[in-house]
Image: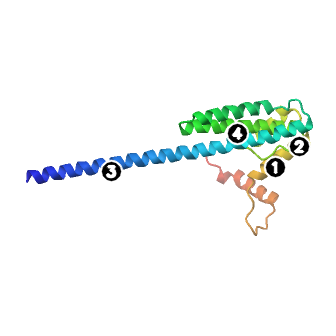
Amino acid sequence: MTTVLLAAIVLVAVMFLVVVASVALAARAYSRRQLGDARAQARHWVERLGAELLVLDAAAVRRRAVDPAGLGEAAERFAAANAELAAARSRRQCRIAQDTAVEGLHHVRTARRSLGLDPGPRVPGQGVVDTIRAALADGSWSMPRLAEAVLADAGERARPLLAGSSVPAAEWVGQKQQQWMHPRTVRR
């Protein structure tokens, strides 16, 4: 009887070790996958910054611009993001590299504006306030260009009305404002 009990205890212990080992291996594989995904996302932004710099540098040469505002800063961010990505061993480090590359893309937009070019596609983290701040810091802004940038940013964030809606946008917004301001809807 004791040998059967001892064999059952050993069998349960072995099964417990197998379960713990498989959970540990699954967690390690999940962590590697997450790191790989974070590295790929950061690499996307670093490569986009590099491509933008190549195009922008060629545009600066064609226009014979001496030193477009933001070009040097974007190049510095590209070098830093590459170095950070090469040394990244965690998702947090990959995120830092990605944020550095995105910051460089903001500088690329500034350089494009200083060359008189279209600022290019939107960059994450740039809202209406950041658009205005970048245009004012750039120094080459004009009211029509600033208004165009703000409207483009707002247009990308706006939600379209449901298909078949007969309410014009301005009227719909007015109705919603009245709803929000009604005393019954305000929580105390």
State which tag comes first along the sequence, 3 or 4.
3
Q: Point out the frontmost of discs 4 and 1.
A: 4
Q: Which mark is residue 19?
A: 3
Q: Which mark is residue 40?
A: none
Residue 160, relative to residue 58: is it above or below?
Answer: below
Q: Point out the frontmost of discs 4 and 2.
A: 4
Density class for disc 2 (Cα within 10 Å; few <14, some 14-19, many ≥20) is: few
How far apart are labels 3 and 4 at the CA level? Answer: 42 Å
The x and y percentages for residue 104 are 73, 36
Residue 64, relative to residue 15: is it above or below?
Answer: above
Residue 167 occupies which quadrant of the picture? bottom right
Residue 97 occupies which quadrant of the picture? top right
Q: Which residue is mark 1?
A: 152
Residue 122, relative to residue 87: is it above or below?
Answer: below
Q: Name the residue type under label 4.
A: Val
Apparent side of residue 12 relative to residue 139 in the rendered image (left or right): left
Q: Name the residue type under label 3.
A: Val
State which tag comes first along the sequence, 1 or 3.
3
Q: Secondary structure at mark 4?
A: helix
Q: Which residue is mark 2?
A: 145
Apparent side of residue 126 relative to residue 25 in the rendered image (left or right): right
Quadrant where the N terminus sits is bottom left
State which tag comes first along the sequence, 4 or 1.
4
How far apart are labels 4 and 1 at the CA level? Answer: 19 Å
